[in-house]
Amino acid sequence: MNRISQILNIKHPIVQAPMSWLTDAHLVASVADAGGLGFLAPHAGQTTNPTSNEEVLERMRNEIRKVKALTDKPFGVPFMLSYDFSLIPLMVDLFIEEGVPVVLDNGWLDPEIYAKLKNAGIKIICRLPNPNLADALKAQALGADILVLTGFDEGGTLPMKEVGSFNVLAEFVGKVDLPIMLAGGIADKKSVQAALTLGAEGVWIGTAFIATSECRSHQKVKEWIVNSTANDLLLFRTEPYYYRSLPTELAKKCFEMSENGATRSEIAKVMNAGTGMRLGMLEGDFENGYVSVGNGISQIHKIKSVKELIDELMA
């Protein structure tokens, strides 16, 4: 037991990252029952885009209830589930109504929302999109329970600065009182041990969970991850900063545009973020979609169950 395990009331200080389109109640409950903390994410359990904010709320309410029917252990949900930020207060109210144990703030840092969540007894994990000490100290002052630091090794929307995970961690250890989780490129027990040795108290993992049998990612995606290394990935500029992907046809086009000087907004239109991820990662359409993963794929050699993965990470 360490501070993160105690705060989140979990056995192992491991969090399954919220990954758009790729989470559902089954995955999250499996992570919870294996001793970690799972997060639902935008479009959890869905195959189509919502048609209204009301539908976003109702879909998430239903998925939360499914998790609670599958496990009595803690789980989490981010309160930023849409590009429409007016939805955030309604989502926070939903979490309070449904008794969600843990909420993720992706750097919104709103005092009223923090106060409301704290008054409801909900734990707050703050993950800054671009790690910086000023925002970390602000999150601490607002009442965040845990800080997640993300290095450039991660999958998904990359930070602005091209600084590796362990170097990001070194900058913050000893300067904040919050327990720190490290995200980016962590996918085996050696990288977990390295993170803990360097001062993190837990790890935040995405890509390794994509390659589990419980994840709803397409089977072709799981097999591609297992058979690839970080050297196979394509890194390209887009909005807001960078993205990396396995070399789908769409990713190749975005990479070529980036190399040839296209603007970030031009590349972002071709990338078609939310839809491109659904097509590539959920449906296995490598012509029209992308497969966003982190540098940790070099450490993934087998499709495992969630329990096998967590047991190995904590061995």
Image: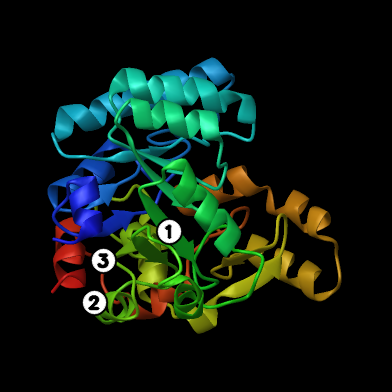
Task: Determine the residue positioned at 28% across, 25% down.
Answer: 99
Dividing the picture into quarters, in which one does residue 52 lie? top right
Q: Where is residue 235? Give x, y as percent.
A: 64, 72
Secondary structure beneath label 3: loop
Q: Who's the residue at 17% across and 50% down the image?
A: 10
Q: Quadrant of the N terminus?
A: bottom left
Give the camera-side residue of 260 and 29: 29
- Which numbered mark, 2 or 3, is in the foreground of this view? 2
Judge from the rendering whether residue 243 lies leftward or rightward of residue 54; answer left or right: right
Residue 225 vertical position relative to residue 194 in the rendered view, above or below: above
Label 3: how many residues lie within 10 Å, few (<14), some (14-19) or many (20+)?
many
* 1 or 3: tag closer to the N-terminus: 1
| Residue 225's disc number | none
Element carrying mark 2: helix
Closer to the N terminus: mark 2 or mark 3?
A: 2
- Sequence-earlier tag: 2 or 1: 1
Question: Callout 3, which amino acid?
Answer: Ile
Kindly indicate whether the residue at mark 3 contacts the one at mark 2 (C-beta within 8 angstroms).
no
Give residue 204's position: percent from left, percent from top.
36, 60
- C-alpha span from label 2 to label 1: 19 Å
Residue topped by disc 2: 189
Tell me the tag on residue 148.
1
Whether residue 9 sits left or right of residue 90 in the image: it is: left
Residue under the point 21% across and 70% down:
313
Residue sitting at x 77%, y 58% = 267
- Compared to residue 29, the image places residue 17 above or below, namely below
> What residue is pinned by disc 3?
303
- Mark 1 belongs to which amino acid? Val
Identity of the amino acid at label 2? Answer: Lys
Is 167 on the left-hand or right-hand side of 264? left
What distance separates the C-alpha of mark 2 from that of mark 3?
Answer: 16 Å
Q: Is mark 1 on a helix, strand or loop?
A: strand
